[in-house]
Image: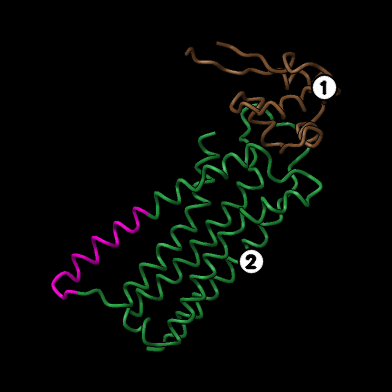
Amino acid sequence: MSVFPSIALAILIALAALAFALRAAVPARPAEDALQSGEPVPLAPLQRVSWWTLAAGLAFAVAATVVIAGKGVETWWTVDAVRLPVTGLMLAALLASLAPMTLARRNAASRGVLVDERDLEILRRAPSVQGAATLVRLALWTVVLMESFHAAGSVPVPFLVLVNWSCLVVYALALPVGILIGYWRR
Amino acid sequence: MPRAEVHNQIRRLRFEHGEMTQQALAERAGCTRQTIVVLEQSRYVPSLLLAMRIAKVFGVTVEEVFQLHE
């Protein structure tokens, strides 16, 4: 069976997610009117970008996972037409995670305030979620690989590469998650 | 140490200043509208700098805007 339909689908999903992420990077101007009682708090620009970053990053990561799971680790590792698009999807997931930081940097050049002291405090605390998520991910990989390949005596190289990719992507996606948790708590 | 809360009069002061919108206050104080929203709901304690800026916008002292309740 040809791998191209699934790759094309994965790329299509990735492009759609990227388009949404780029659209979200331009924060909409909030309404001038004050909140009515009981009305939910509007999303802060950083919060909105974090939601879209998470959605785009997840779409890229899920697309890559679907391709690897669908074709198998061996095919992914040996067939260029599978491996290279997956590499692209993983890199896209990493790049998408830069959006919140980009917004914070754009703040200084903006006429209005995109990110204020409360947003920066939330942004400063978010990396603690990244550390925890990466630790959990590494622990899971270690247990799974140890139990799967203990008898063989060594872990095949493709799995080691997968460990690297998955930890990088989890680390990247944990930033918007940490930011959203920060807004939810405060 | 007893639990302390910081209450504020931002909503009343906005009303007394010609129904100033949250967005207008945010722009003049140098923060986002969302921060004004959570401040009015007493869900966020601002830095001294932001507190002084908000007080300056209304032309009052910080103590007239923010009160410590223990």
Q: Which residue is identified by label 1?
A: B58
Helix, strand or loop status at disc 1:
helix
- Tell me the number on the disc at residue A135: none
Please state if A165 lies on the left or on the right of B45 as rendered. left
Is A89 colored magenta in this rendering? no
Mark 2: few, some, or many residues within 10 Å (few <14, many ≥20)? few
Is A147 colored magenta in this rendering? yes
Please name the residue shown 50% across and 72% down the image: A89
Q: Position of residue A134 (x, y in %)?
A: 39, 55
On the rendered image, what quadrant is the N terminus of chain A found in? bottom left
Q: Position of residue A99 (x, y in %)?
A: 62, 57
Give the chain ID for the green colour. A
On the rendered image, what quadrant is the C terminus of chain A found in? top right
Kind of residue indicated by mark 2:
Ala
Give the chain ID for the brown colour. B
Q: Position of residue A18 (x, y in %)?
A: 60, 66
Mark 1: few, some, or many residues within 10 Å (few <14, many ≥20)? some
- Tell me the number on the disc at residue A19: 2
Picture layout, residue B27 above or below residue A91: above
* Span of residues in magenta: A135-153
